Amino acid sequence: MEALIILDWGIAAKRLQFSYHEPIEFLTTMKFVAQIEHMKAFAREIHFTLDAEMIRMVETANASLSNHVKAEIAALIGDNMFKERLDYVMAVLFVEDREKLNSSEDFLACYRDKPASELLFHLAAAKYNDEKMEWTKGNDWGTIANDVGLLYELVAGCELSDQAEHTSLLDHIRFPEEYKQRTLFIMEQFHRYAYLPIRDRLKELGEAGAAKYRALFEEQPERAIRDITKMDVDLIDKETAVHVSYFSQVRVGIHRDDREGHSHLVVLGINNDVFAWRREDQETIERFLKVIADRRRMELIELLHHKNYYGNELAQEMGLTPAAISYHTNMLFDLNLIQLIRVDNRIYYELDKEKIGYYWEQTRRILLP
């Protein structure tokens, strides 16, 4: 039995195809530059130091953009991870067409070719998903995405909790081509002045990260899959493309594609291994105490103690947005307190109760020697 388990992890590791996907890094870079202060705060909270070179890249990118473009990026993407806007639209388009997109220019061309109504449908879907609201009134998503009049009617009839957000969304839908050209303009400006000067360096860093992980997963498949991807082996049930992101630093993202002939997609931060395998000392216990000091994360741990949940279930149970759930689960991922498992066709969060017990014991040892 033991040999079979080892073989399973080895087979799973061989299904992971590590390579550099430029469109993903372009999207990640734009999102990170827009949300740099929030990302710095997150890093401080988990006691992780962002790479100095990356901070310099962000500063250089900001210095290369006009105040108008920076203000537009802030308005259309936002300054934190809790609300998804243009970054969500960009991610959805990439996932839909990723087999055809090999460069940042390919992605921009793809965006130019999309009808404005489709872009705004994805924007609306992101906002209503954040608030867990049913807004389509039974209409087929494909129909809504191709009918801007119907989209406006549905949005007008389902008010968001944030009145300013709702007014802004309606305004975008009233002037769909303006929204498309406005967002395309800031992407092109960011691409030309902020991204292209660092493109080659990001590719070099990303390819080096992919080579590092390829070796780690070949040498220690079970440990690497558990600690670096935070996944159960069952999630890697077919070929899976893995992008190692320099700008993400510490991240786990997965898109499962169950269509035949299509691979799954995983995005890993380039420093996941450093963070996952650093020595569990007093600093780690301090991070653990800080994580559980937040009542929302304590509630999340308590829920997962009783059963496994998938993302939207947790969002509904806790009254938080999916983006906020992702933020808090990342904190638990970083301490290896939870992992991803598959049940049927859903991905669930599973609490590592032994790890919780271990941290409690280490806390007692440090505080009461």
Image (spheres, grey):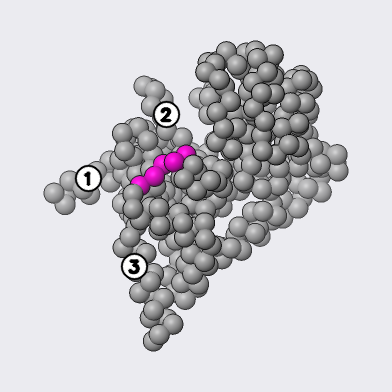
What residue sits right under mark 2 in the picture?
257
Q: Position of residue 289 (x, y in %)?
A: 49, 69
Q: Nearer the observer, disc 1 or disc 3?
A: 3
Disc number for residue 357: 3
Q: Is residue 310 found inside the magenta-colored segment of the image?
A: yes
**Nearer to me, 338 or 171:** 171
Bounds of the magenta segment: 308-313
Q: Nearer the observer, disc 2 or disc 1?
A: 2
Instruction: Give the CA distance from mark 3 to mark 2.
Output: 35 Å
What residue sits right under mark 1 in the picture?
7
Seen at 46% across and 72% down, the residue is: 285
Q: Nearer the observer, disc 3 or disc 2?
A: 3
Mark 1 residue crowding within 10 angstroms, few (<14) / some (14–19) / many (20+):
some
Hey, what amino acid is under mark 3?
Gly
**Nearer to me, 242 or 46:** 46
Hey, what amino acid is under mark 2?
Asp
Seen at 35% across and 32% down, the residue is: 345
Q: Position of residue 10 (x, y in %)?
A: 28, 45
Instruction: Give the CA distance from mark 2 to mark 1.
Output: 24 Å
Q: Position of residue 236 (x, y in %)?
A: 34, 38
- Against 72, residue 250 (above or below) is below
Residue 319 left/right relative to 200: left
- Against 60, residue 192 (above or below) is above
| SS state under label 1 | helix
